[in-house]
Image: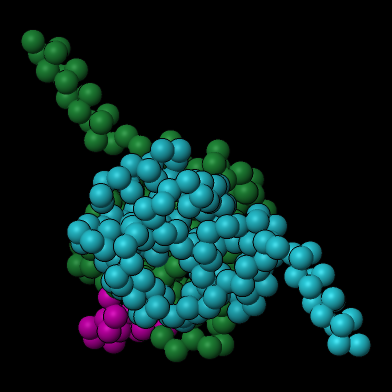
Chain colours: A green, B cyan
Amino acid sequence: MNALKSLFAIALIAVMTAGAPVKPGYEVGDSATDFKLKNYDGKMVSMADYKDAKGYIVIFNCNTCPYSKAYDSRIIALNKKYASKGFPVLTINPNDPGLSPGDSFDEMKSQAKRNKYDFPYLVDETQDVARTYGATNTPHVYVLDKVSETNLKVVYIGAIDDNSRNADAVTKRYVEDAVDAIMQSKNVPVTKTKAIGCTIKWKNS
Amino acid sequence: MKFLIITFVLAVGIGSPNLQPAEKVKIEDLQKMIGGNSGKIQVINFWATWCAPCIKELPLFEQANATREDIEVSLVSIDLDLDPNPDKVYRFIDRKKLKSKVYILDERDPNTWIDKIDKSWSGAIPATLVVNLENGKRKFVEKELKEGELEEIINSVK
């Protein structure tokens, strides 16, 4: 009977976790979980490694999406501006390289080196982190406020800014505004935005 | 001379029979399409020339458009969000000989219009909205459709 019960439980878990992403993910106000993922240089990286961080700019991103390409220099600029102020950028590639060969670990390595990333570009091989956060497309940003060692509060979810095709024509810098607000202990002005992007390439879906 | 010009125009016209001008539309135009009074089920697919899964599923929409009388297919390109030049879309339509009606969405700042299509849409494509204007039933899906799935969705709003 017990064996049957556990078999049933396993089957249930399998059904629940199979295929397409479980939609909800994080909402603004939730406490985000840390991760431990492999960086393009082979080293494992967690948010906890950044002892002096006051928060994090977590970006689900990839090599192949034209939106990721359009935002590449803006992501590099975000880290240059905010890492020294205690808000490092961490980028995570969740795409299944089986479905998107241009997003393989080797391609990630070349891209990070070619574009001189001075921030982690991590591989989410199981796609668990993207699923937990509720990421749907690339690039998809989560700004986290490190309220305490155990509470990484999600304060912003969405796009980097309001103009994908032209960085010079941007009028709303959502991510910068969110980080600036945390630094000044103010309320984040816009906590959630939507943007056009490439769907994350989920395994078996 | 006049005759020559007319002949030339005719020749060009005959030379490219499949060329359909993709009309640029605003979000209000799409909202009218979704809320209008057409007797047919509206099938609105959001795609872009850079989106591989979108291109993969396009034949399903072309086939439905060609074989079903009860639907009206609109392929809405969102290419302009990234590239101000629509030529890629025109060339794509020509190369693939698309028969369904193609529109090019001419909007900036997606955050202001994504919710007007569907609140559940994250903004990732492909995405498809199917609306039956007669009974008010609608279905929105944000994923690449596989063989048979589009038919299922259309039938679910009947």
Let me know if residue A176 is in the magenta part: yes
- Determine if residue B99 is in view: yes
Q: Is residue B65 above or below residue A20?
A: below
Q: Is residue A176 above or below residue B90?
A: below
Q: Residue at x 27, y 29 (%)?
A: A14
> Which residue in the rendered view is the most extreme toward the front?
B3
Seen in the image, is B148 located left or right of residue A148? right
Please identify the quadrant where the N terminus of chain A is shown: top left
User: Which of the two residues, A54 or A112, is positioned nearer the viewer here?
Assistant: A112
Seen in the image, is A31 located left or right of residue A107? left
Residue stretch in magenta: A173-191
User: Which of the two residues, B75 or B158, is positioned nearer the viewer here?
Assistant: B158
Please identify the quadrant where the C terminus of chain A is shown: top left
Toward which corner of the image does residue B92 lie, by quadrant? bottom right
Seen in the image, is B49 located left or right of residue A184? right
User: Which of the two residues, B24 or A142, is positioned nearer the viewer here?
Assistant: B24
Residue B99, image x, y percentages = 57, 57
Q: Residue at x 24, y 35 (%)?
A: A16
Let me know if residue B35 is in the magenta part: no
Toward which corner of the image does residue A165 lie, by quadrant? bottom right
Q: Residue at x 61, y 44 (%)?
A: A101
